[in-house]
Amino acid sequence: NIEYLTKGGFSKIYTAGWINGPYEEWDSKKQQLERIKVPGIQNFVASVILKELENVENASQSWFEEAKLHLNISNKYPRIIQCYGLTQNPSNGNYMLVMDKMDIDLRKYLQQNHNQLTWKERIKIAYDIIIALIAIHDENAIHRDLHSGNILYSKLDQDWYISDLGFCGPADKSTESIYGNLPYIAPEVISGKKTTVESDIYSIGMLMWEISSGQPPFNYYENDYKLALNIINGMRPKVISGTPLKYENLMKQCWDADPSKRPDIDTLCNRIHQLLQFYQNISNEILQQETNNNLEKLINNTMSKHISSKLFT
């Protein structure tokens, strides 16, 4: 039951049912791999995504190395969308990634739920994304294309996952080529410099703003040369009223024009974790009233007293 879903970037996306699902564990007695077993269901069908990569007739060795990296990372770390392997479309020979199917992407989720989200919930989303990016950077990898369409949510786990590990562009791309969603691309990359881990941090800054606002950055601008030039010249989204000061400062550090001034992924994780811990200690009653400006000042003042200033400098 393969159904066309959408087209994204350089790939066509299909949904499919995987009869009996993926192999789950090694049975030492039978000396064979065993598939997932669901109690009460004999003919289990796992919902998966098939991502057909177009124009890969000249697929280079580096492309396969990158595909191998995605398989490796997704099998080692829980916050990366599980990638089970590659198959080929029998009709045209194009490669297809077999991946877990999630429920919704961050962009749609924010459009549907943003007004109901507390700051604790918003910060938790940012924290989940950063935790996932740690896994990628720890493997000396770069995502290169972080945006809200690549951040996916599982209702079952109630967690956020990173998808599309940077190789869903043309197979013959070079690291100097610009691919991705313009509002999330770091200014130095737009200017022609190589993508780096610091470029991913810039994208996190844009995602933090989107989480705070409920809208994609530069949503009312054309994704064209003028927008690219404005980003290079320092244009950033306007901070939303009511954004916690510590969150705002961290977000601005992430999108700093100077890559060397952006926090590394571990520092970023520590800071957002401290912020999340603070909000988790606030009572639900207070959280329901947190849009009040006076309360926002109180929260920021309280945090300054209770959280080490070293974490936010």
Image (cartoon, grey):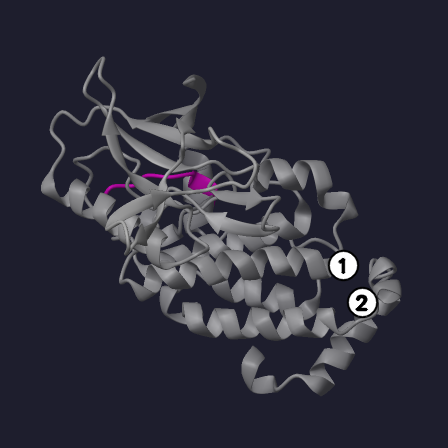
- The residue lying toward the viewer, choosing from 172 and 202, is 172
Q: Answer yes or no: is residue 313 visible.
A: no
Q: Callout 1, which amino acid? A: Gly
Cβ atoms at labels 1 and 2 below 8 Å apart: yes
Query: Is 102 positioned to the left or the right of 1 in the image?
Result: right
For image coordinates 64% across by 71% down, the residue present is 275
Q: Which residues are magenta?
A: 176-183
How crowded is the residue under tag 2: few (<14 C-alpha within 10 Å), some, or many (20+)? some
Percent coordinates x, y for residue 19 in the rendering? 40, 27
Mark 1 is surrounded, within 10 Å at the Cα level, by few (under 14), some (14 to 19) or many (20 or more) other residues, namely some
For label 1, the residue is 242
Identify residue type, mark 2: Glu
Q: In the displayed image of the protein, which residue is found farthest to the front?
A: 29
268 with respect to 13 (left or right): right
Residue beneath label 2, please?
296
Task: Determine whether the residue tagged by mark 1 lies in a helix, strand or loop.
Answer: loop
Q: Is residue 180 magenta?
A: yes
151, above or below 92, in the image = below
Q: Determine whether, in the image, residue 210 is placed left or right of residue 58.
A: right
Answer yes or no: is residue 284 visible: yes
Note whether 62 is above or below 241 in the view shown: above
Residue 55 located left or right of residue 279: left
Residue 84's disc is: none
Mark 2, secondary structure of its residue: helix
Rendered location of residue 179, percent (x, y): 32, 39
Coordinates of residue 157 in the picture (x, y in percent): 58, 50
First of labels 1, 2 by sequence position: 1
